[in-house]
């Protein structure tokens, strides 16, 4: 069982609260989403493992069991071309649970007309493989979001 933790602090809104039909429809995979606090912050690794994909606005960490977890910082933030995001880790890095990966400010993303809501998705998983899925309430970085069998 892999425990997937919140990569940032905020209010959990579930995938249904993501203003993007691909994420909201769980087409990328099952998971949840966080509406982050509007302060400069560091998004952290939701699992310990290796970063296999690294973009300013999104990253994937794969754990020892082969579970890939996507953290997507905001919606349509790829259009910002990295502006406002500072990489603290690189593709290929081994990261510890809770290790800072990207520094960003959700308030700046929102000011540029993008949603700062952050999907946290279990890639190539079925909804049935997840347990204890958190879809409401508030979280701090490192709080449990869901388990993955």
Image (cartoon, rainbow, N blue to C red):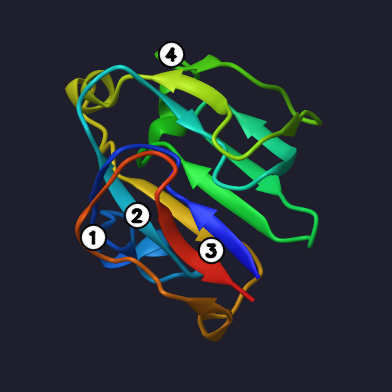
- Residue position for label 3: 28
| Label 4 residue SS | loop
Q: Which mark is first along the chain, 3 or 2?
A: 3
Residue drawn 79% across and 62% down? 65
Q: Which mark is first along the chain, 4 or 1?
A: 1
- Residue position for label 4: 83
Residue drawn 60% across and 40% down? 97
Q: Which mark is first along the chain, 3 or 4?
A: 3
- Residue position for label 2: 33
Residue 75 image position (x, y, % from top left): 35, 42
Q: Quadrant of the C terminus?
A: bottom right
Q: Quadrant of the N terminus?
A: bottom right
Residue 52 image position (x, y, % from top left): 75, 41
Q: Which mark is first along the chain, 2 or 4?
A: 2
- Residue position for label 1: 17
Relative side of 15 to 47, left or right: left
């Amino acid at each position: 069982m892999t425990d997937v933790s919140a990569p940032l602090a905020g209010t959990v809104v579930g995938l249904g609260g993501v203003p993007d039909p691909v994420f909201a429809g769980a087409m990328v995979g099952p998971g949840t989403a966080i509406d982050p606090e509007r302060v400069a912050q560091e998004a952290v690794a939701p699992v310990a493992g290796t970063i296999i994909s690294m973009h300013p606005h999104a990253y994937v960490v794969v754990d020892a069991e082969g579970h890939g977890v996507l953290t997507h910082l905001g919606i349509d933030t790829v259009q910002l071309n990295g502006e406002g995001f500072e990489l603290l880790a690189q593709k290929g890095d081994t990261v510890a649970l809770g290790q800072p990966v990207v520094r960003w400010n959700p308030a700046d993303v929102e000011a540029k007309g993008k949603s700062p809501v952050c999907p946290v998705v279990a890639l190539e998983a079925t909804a049935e493989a997840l347990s204890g899925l958190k879809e409401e309430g508030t979280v701090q970085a490192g709080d449990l979001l869901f388990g993955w069998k």
